[in-house]
Image: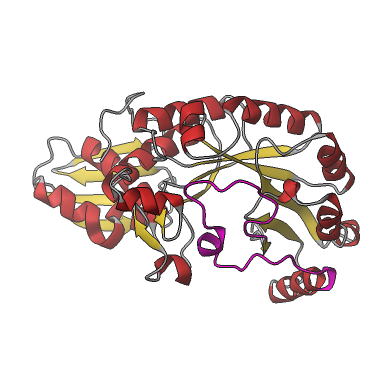
Amino acid sequence: MRRRRVIVPFFISHQGCPHACVFCDQQRISGESGSLPASDEIRDKIAAYRASAGETTVEVAFYGGSFTMLPLHQQRGLLAPLQPLRDAGQVSTIRLSTRPDALGPAVMALLREFRVSLVELGVQSMDDAVLAGAGRGHTAADTTRAFSVLGDAGIAAGGQLMPGLPGDSPNGALSSLHRLLAHNPACLRIYPTVVVAGTELAARFRRGEYLPLTLGDAVALGARLLHKALLAQVPVIRMGLQATDLLSGPHGVIAGPYHPAFRQLVESELCYDLLRRLTAGATGAVTVRAHPSRLSDAIGHQGSNRNRLGKEGIVLERLIPDVTVAPHDLAVSFSGITRKGNIMTDLHYPETEAHHG
């Protein structure tokens, strides 16, 4: 049996970054205050996670902020306590996130010295006009250079994208993903832009200067982005912001496609598109078989796929978990006919989209 990955998270919200991006309020996004943990706090938290997971080897991740823009002595203070634990086999990998323009020679030497395994880059977009409008302070060329220097150092690189920024479009988001995939990222995160209270984007929204993606449009676009990543065999490790009390509260997200189950909405959209294809011309009751891990996506969030297909005259009578069906496959039966389809190979989306809510 494959052992479950255990990630020990440390949040350094808004630490190190001199920029004030229009969408950014890291404390609300992460739910953390952003103070840097001391060495003993790091060791104690890792020990607690290992104890609860049966003394397994763990991964350590520094989330939020721009790690490599911290003063070098602070970076060392965070990474040094992990080295004996790596030597002892208690910590397997170290990952952190930063800006594409924050990987100078001194930083790269430090990352190699302290055996950082993966760096996630806050790419957000590969369109320079969108980046400028968001106040990012870096360009797409900086992202290209960052992937190059990390690759030369033997450090894996991932990327984060934010569809729906000011000036962005579905076509632009698809283009950004295409350009990012050309760098062979180790992983991706896709965060549709939401409007968080207290940000410049919130002020623009209230003045009528910014219109975020609707949830429906964000899900439809997210399905196409996820599908492209699946075809490229690049894991998308998160879609949508992680739910926190601050984000869900009255002073958190005030507009935009925020949903605590955004990833499931996207996975369900892929299943819906495949089910529509497989049930074309169906009459009578339809039975759907899916791998147990895919069954809830086939049904749709709160039964949405069953309801949507029902409005089109397709009656999903039975949805059956079946371990013989591959996780990316769905099988439908009706009127003595059985059809099987694969989410990756049997869905064909256009390279461009024509709508933005």
Region of the chain picked out in magenta, as a range: 12-40
Q: How many marks?
A: 0
Can residue 194 be spotted in the picture? no
Q: Position of residue 28 (x, y in %)?
A: 51, 64
Q: Position of residue 261 (x, y in %)?
A: 39, 59
**Image height of 318 relative to 192, above or below:** below
Q: Is residue 88 left or right of residue 23?
A: right
Q: How is the image coloured?
A: secondary structure
Can residue 170 be spotted in the picture? yes
Q: Position of residue 104 (x, y in %)?
A: 79, 35
Q: Position of residue 271 (x, y in %)?
A: 32, 45
The reply to whether the magenta stretch includes residue 33 is yes
**Image height of 156 relative to 72, above or below:** above
**Which quarter of the rendered picture does the N terminus lie within?**
bottom right
Quarter of the rendering containing residue 337: top left
The residue that appears at 75% across and 33% down in the rendered structure is 150
Q: Is residue 38 left or right of residue 234?
A: right
**Magenta stretch secondary structure, dominant:** loop
Q: Is residue 42 left or right of residue 283?
A: right
The residue that appears at 26% across and 28% down in the rendered structure is 354
The reply to whether the magenta stretch includes residue 255 is no
Foreground residue, 61 or 231?
A: 61
Quarter of the rendering containing residue 282: top left
**Which quarter of the rendered picture does the C terminus lie within?**
top left
Quarter of the rendering containing residue 350: top left
Q: Is residue 322 left or right of residue 14?
A: left
